[in-house]
Image: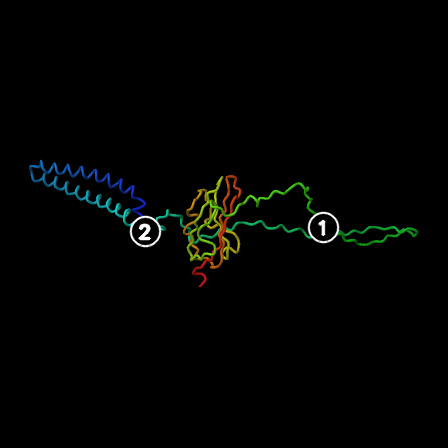
Amino acid sequence: MDRVYVFLIRNDVWIYIICGLGLLWYLNELFRGQGALRRAMFGLERETALRTRNKALLFVFIFGAIAASVTYVNSAIRPNLPPELLRPPTPTINASFAPTIAPTEATPELPATPTSPIAPTVTLSGQPSQSVTGTFTTTLGAPQDTPMPANTQAPSTEEQISGCTPDAIISEPREGATVLGLLNVFGSANTEDFGYYEIDINGPQTNQRWASLVGRRIVQPVQDGILAGNVNLSPWAAGAYEIRLTISNQDEQITHQCSVSILLRTGAEE
């Protein structure tokens, strides 16, 4: 029944418009049928006029009852409904969704240290020339980094990334909250020079690597609303997870990151 109430509340304007147009049409039909009934002189004319009037009366009653029902739901029932029912619908994540594992850069392996066999010929003084052959092994060390001047400071992108702020925050679930299968992420992503935001998750199901929770970038800013809704984590492995909000600017540079830790409990742990 709650679904009927929510439908009437969300579409009340259109329902009022349709009911108003229907009432205007069938009131006109009602007056026309009533006038024809008064002027009818023969039985067939009276029967036709009577049928037209009764049909108009029926539809006037139906449209009036619908409009009255919507008015009653908005005035008496809406204040008692849970706020969660009146929130705007959010996209539902497929239960078979496989998280997209963000690729990480593998650390390049340094080539094995080469050895250079050197066999020099040494001539001893005061004796006939003879050759002494030996083998020397030299180790080529890794090249040392060129030191930077003392007055030069290496640029750091980490200093440009801010943490949680009122415009970049995960308000629900809260730090340390327990999630029972279905996850809804609320908060704000509405920073200056906003470009897009992403919601990532890290835990046992993702092999302790960051993975996209919704599988895409979201370009619409959010202020005190739903960042990711109805994410079904029931098939996932239970355990401790971390949820991260990442916001980038118009130049696709990360400006804010905010994360919370949760405990996921699902049927998979039984």
Which residue appears farthest toward the right when viewing the image?
126
- Label 1 belongs to which residue? 141
Residue 82 coordinates in the image, percent (x, y): 34, 52
Closer to the observer: label 2 or label 1? 2
On screen, residue 140 versus residue 84, left or right, reads right
Kind of residue at badge 1: Gly
Give the colour scheme of this rendering. Answer: rainbow
Number of the label disc, if any, that sits on residue 81: 2
Which residue appears farthest toward the bottom when viewing the image?
270
Nearer the observer, 244 or 131: 244
Could you tell me which secondary element the residue under label 2 belongs to?
A: loop
On screen, residue 81 versus residue 134, left or right, reads left
On screen, residue 194 versus residue 153, left or right, reads left
Residue 89 coordinates in the image, percent (x, y): 37, 47
Residue at mark 2 to residue at mark 1: CA–CA distance: 73 Å
Residue at 8%, 37% in the rendered image: 40
